[in-house]
Image (spheres, grey):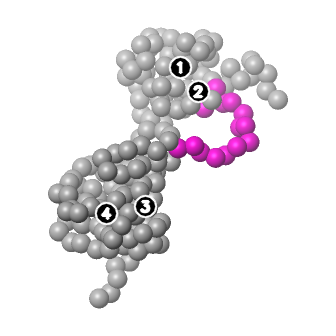
Amino acid sequence: METTEEVLAGVGPRLRRLRQERNVTLTALAEATGISVSTLSRLESGKRRPSLELLLPLAQAHQVPLDELVGAPAVGDPRIRPRPLRMHDMVVLPLTRRPGGVQAFKMVVPERIPPPEPRTHGGYEWLYVLNGRLRLHLAGREMVLEPGEAAEFDTRLPHWFGGAGGPVEVLSLFGPQGERMHLRAKPRRS
């Protein structure tokens, strides 16, 4: 078992790695947390002992649990405990905790009558139907996906989706433009 000193010594390198993985400068992190650049630099180099007053704003800025910053040992329970969110008419369960990169969600999407206007936004989305049928409108084309089918698309294309004949449960992976999921559903032959 690690001593307190060994745990604290690992915090600095962990903070540096986390900041660099997110391509955040010390200056930007200082602005987000209210912690000076020199203090952040000393924390990362191990020249400053981490305290709760410093780690809490860093955990919030990186949107990670405090345990991840200090390298707390696993407690033996790998379950995630997502909290359902209401987004417009959908129930959304976030399955990932860190910002940036690909995000995973489980969504319960109602049947939408009449269908909403197609929307666009930056990013790339992958949808996998778990239960029910998904009506997907993409760039003027409409299709219905059955359980076990997936669709992948650039969200800059006009799109909307909803349940076909009732609510549908969907696994969604969404990421910034260019991050593709590398799994595509083959179109059905007519």
Q: Check disc 2 and report its element: helix, strand or loop.
A: helix
Q: Which residue is mark 2?
A: 66
Residue 177 percent across, percent down from the top left:
31, 51
Residue 102 x %, y %: 43, 49
Q: Amino acid at mark 1?
A: Leu
> Which class describes the residues within 10 Å of circle 2: few (<14), some (14-19), or many (20+)?
some
Which structural element holds mark 3? strand
Callout 3 crowding tier (Cα within 10 Å): few <14, some 14–19, many ≥20:
many
Residue corresponding to mark 3: 170
**Mark closer to the chain start, 1 or 2:** 1
Question: Residue shown at 20%/54% (left/top)?
Answer: 119
Spatial distance from mark 3 to mark 2, Cα to Cα?
Answer: 30 Å
Q: Report, in whole angstroms, how far the alpha carbon at label 3 lies from the one at label 4.
A: 13 Å
Magenta part of the protein: which range? 68-82
Asked whether the residues under the numbered discs 1 and 2 touch, taking CB atoms below 8 Å apart as contact, a structural biologist would say yes
Between the residue at mark 1 and the residue at mark 4, the CA separation in whole angstroms equals 42 Å
Residue under the image location 33 percent in, 71 percent down: 165
Question: Disc 3 residue type?
Answer: Val
Number of the front mark, 1 or 4:
4
Pointer 4 residue: 111
- Residues at discs 1 and 4 in contact (Cβ within 8 Å): no
- Residue occupied by mark 1: 56
Does 80 lie within the magenta span?
yes
Q: Main secondary structure of the magenta part?
A: loop
* The furthest residue to the right: 1
Residue at horizontal 31 percent and vertical 63 percent from the top? 111
Kindly check if marks 3 and 1 are in contact, taking CB atoms under 8 A apart as contact. no
